[in-house]
Amino acid sequence: MAIKNVEQLQDMHLDVLKELGSIGSGNAASALSELLQCNTDIAVPSVKVLDFSDAVNFLGGPENIAIGMLISISGDITGMMLYVLQKSFASRMTKALFGSEIENLLEMNDMEKSFISEVGNIMGGSYINAIAALTGMTIDISVPVMTVDMVGAILSVPVVEFAQVGNKALFIDDSFKIDGGEIKSNMILVPEMESLETLFTRLGVSG
């Protein structure tokens, strides 16, 4: 059965995506640990299929200010990844590296923005490299395009992208522990449906 939208994904598909997420997140935790020079652990990610309205509420509501990082995927599979990071995540990152926390996301300086963008690049690369390694596919990602805005505005980009295939998205909830303190990152994966079907075929998962 051809997968026409994410609502058709079955438990076995979500299990595969969760396993890919676990490998990618583990790679990201190792890379962040090296970058920050501190102990970084990762829990098994939660993979959900959510309505965009539910995703917005999960991320603190439409007016909650957060960081959005959009990464384009190209090569053997195409689509986009959207990381949504809360102030608590960004503050933990900057405190670990610079010794100071971010008080207001809208007032980040250029150094903080550059650093958080690099963190997004590392996390996105870790996830995509996990997929490429397991499937043997060639997959490239763009440099993250970072924005600081209300969650409702940030999620308007994948809403438009998903318009033709439904109003639900793959929502991946990661939980990191950095020096014992827990923080979360959330990723919305927006693959083209043909690419998603190609991915499952490479991994031996039929519809």
Image (cartoon, helix red, strand yellow):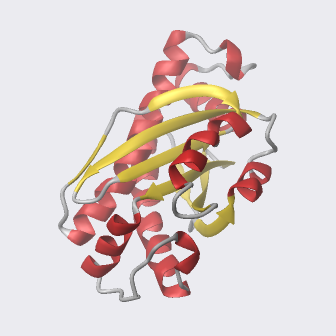
Considering every residue shown, the one lying at the far front of the view is 164
159 left or right of 18? Answer: right
Q: Pick the quarter of the image with the C terminus.
A: bottom left
Q: Is residue 67 left or right of residue 36?
A: right
Q: x, y percentage for residue 185?
A: 61, 48
Whether 202 is drawn above or below 130: the answer is below
Tell me if I can see residue 110 in this picture.
yes
* Residue 82 sits above or below residue 5 on the image: above
Vertical comparison of 9 with 43: above or below:
below
In the rendered image, which quarter is residue 85 located in? top right
- For image coordinates 41% across by 68% down, the residue present is 20
Whether 200 is drawn above or below 90: the answer is below
- Where residue 161 appears, x then y in whole percent? 51, 49
Task: Determine the residue positioned at 60% across, 49% down.
Answer: 159
Compare residues 202 and 5 and report the one nearer the observer. Answer: 5
Q: Nearer the viewer, residue 175 or 97?
A: 175
Quarter occupied by residue 135: bottom left
- Quadrant into which the N terminus falls: bottom left
Residue 37 in sight here: no
Which residue shows up at 63% across the image and 36% down it?
154
Numbered circles on residues, count: 0
Residue at the spot 79% in from the left edge and 40% down from the top edge = 62
Q: Residue 136: x percent and y percent?
A: 18, 67
